[in-house]
Image (tube, rainbow, N blue to C red):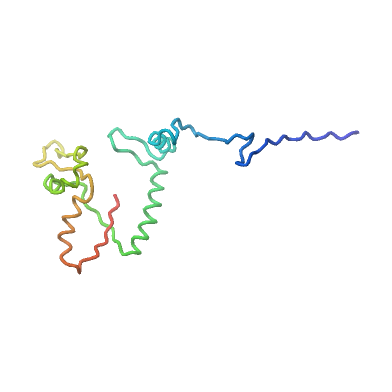
Amino acid sequence: KPKKEKAKEKTPEVDESGAAGGLKKQTRLGLEAKKEENLPDWYSQVITKGELIEYYDVSGCYILRPWAFTIWEQIRDWLDLRFKQLGVRNCYFPMFVSRNALEKEKTHIADFAPEVAWVTKSGESDLAEPIAIRPTSETVMYPAYAKWIQSYRDLPLKLNQWN
């Protein structure tokens, strides 16, 4: 009985880039925008389709999904260890700032002013004076530093705030 020959598998030709058939393989992974043509749209699609963030119904706010938060925790933990090795201590400053404090920094926050969110009520009661959600941390940090640093002996002041 003659032996049957095994069918030879055809191997596609591979060019120097490693792509079969001389064509470079491109995987779009469901992205509609191309990075080279529209970076903002491409980035938005990467972070949403990659399940890193979810947009929220308040403009400028979004939800960090578990993968994104895990990435953030890894980065924060790595940096926190290095900061502590350098003698940097963590602290937290309030998220609210008075109109008066914000006005003192008006040249610094001029670009933020149109987007500052103002809190005007506490429950059903109007606040005596509206308070802002600070656009940057400097507006609450610098006045505290001015109190804490009285001479060169108080330096260096090594603080970090995780937001």
Q: Residue furthest top?
A: 32
Name the foreground residue: 9 vs 74: 9
Q: Looking at the rendering, in which quadrant would you find the N terminus? A: top right
Figure quadrant of residue 154:
bottom left
Figure quadrant of residue 112:
top left
What residue is at 38 percent from the left and 55 percent from the top? 77
Q: On the picture, is 116 further left or further right than 61?
A: left
Q: On the picture, is 114 further left or further right than 51?
A: left
Name the foreground residue: 127 vs 114: 114
What residue is at 16 percent from the left and 38 percent from the top? 123
Q: On the picture, is 43 further left or further right than 25?
A: left
Q: On the picture, is 37 further left or further right than 26?
A: left
Where 85 falls versus 110 (above or below)? Answer: below
What residue is at 20 percent from the left and 40 percent from the top? 116
Rendering coords of residue 12 (x, y %) = 68, 35
Q: Residue furthest bottom?
A: 153
Rendering coords of residue 124 (x, y %) = 13, 36
Where 24 falls versus 76 (above or below)? Answer: above
Rendering coords of residue 47 (x, y %) = 41, 38
Q: Residue furthest left?
A: 128
The total of numbered circles placed on residues is 0
Rendering coords of residue 161 (x, y %) = 27, 54
What residue is at 41 percent from the left and 48 percent from the top? 71
Name the foreground residue: 19 vs 123: 19
Where 111 falls versus 89 (above or below)? Answer: above
